[in-house]
């Protein structure tokens, strides 16, 4: 007997609310909610910034891809919040499209700058940037990543919306 498991993946740039929305959506749908970065940190026994600092980005991207596949292949339903770069490496986006229903949480550069300005210390990719460099960095990164993000099954524009409304839009689009 072939059982069907629901996998919902949320992708988008850091600060777009993926983890928060995953938690709300999981709760509303009665599904397990997971953050891929938290899962990696737990499996590796190190916080993500330490993995980046001690083992480098190539190591991180390699294990990120392995753990993503592990979760997508798991015999359970879940809502999975991905890291901002996850769709852009290896064959991750193909795996996401084949094994889950994907949603791109699309935020404007202004929204992302507002959200990330106070979180720089917890974000290895932007921790060393000066405040005035943040907008340009985000714009450049979004330009590089947009083609991956836009392959998602659905795009939800999140500017000016609260996380419960975003979760509701995802739930109603299924």
Image: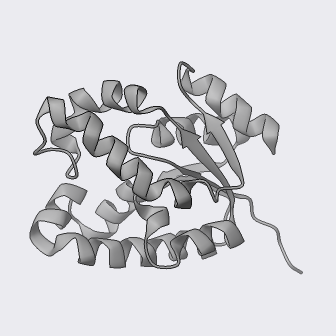
75 or 149, nearer to the observer: 149
The quarter of the displayed image where residue 145 is located: bottom left
Residue at 64% x, 37% y is 156
Residue at 55% x, 39% y is 106
Residue at 56% x, 41% y is 105
Q: Which x, y percent locates residue 33?
A: 55, 48
Along the horizontal axis of the image, is 78 left or right of 67? right
Q: Which x, y percent locates residue 150?
A: 61, 54
Q: Which x, y percent locates residue 27?
A: 63, 37
The quarter of the displayed image where residue 50 is located: bottom left
Along the horizontal axis of the image, is 125 left or right of 150? left
Q: How is the rendered protein coloured?
A: one colour
98 or 133, nearer to the observer: 133
Along the horizontal axis of the image, is 102 left or right of 63? right
54 or 32, nearer to the observer: 54
Height in image: 19 above or below 93? above
Residue 35 visible in the shown view: yes
Q: Which x, y percent locates residue 41?
A: 29, 61
Rendered-image quadrant of the N terminus? bottom right
Height in image: 19 above or below 161? below
Height in image: 139 above or below 102? above
View extreme (right): residue: 1
Residue 83 visible in the shown view: no
Rendered-image quadrant of the C terminus? top right
């Amino acid at each position: 007997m072939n059982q069907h498991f629901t996998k919902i993946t949320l992708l988008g740039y850091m600060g777009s609310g993926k983890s928060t929305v995953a938690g709300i959506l999981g709760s509303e749908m009665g599904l397990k909610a997971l953050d891929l970065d938290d899962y990696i940190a737990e499996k590796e026994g190190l916080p993500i910034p330490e993995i980046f600092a001690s083992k480098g980005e190539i190591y991180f991207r390699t294990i990120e891809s392995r753990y993503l596949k592990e979760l997508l292949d798991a015999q359970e339903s879940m809502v999975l919040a991905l890291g901002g770069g996850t769709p852009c490496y290896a064959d991750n986006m193909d795996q996401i499209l084949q094994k889950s229903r994907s949603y791109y949480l699309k935020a404007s550069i202004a929204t992302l700058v507002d959200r990330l300005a106070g979180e720089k210390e917890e974000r290895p990719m932007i921790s060393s940037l000066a405040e005035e460099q943040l907008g340009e960095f985000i714009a450049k990164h979004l330009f590089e990543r947009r083609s991956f993000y836009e392959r998602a099954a659905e795009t939800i524009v999140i500017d000016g919306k609260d996380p419960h409304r975003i979760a509701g839009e995802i739930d109603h689009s299924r």
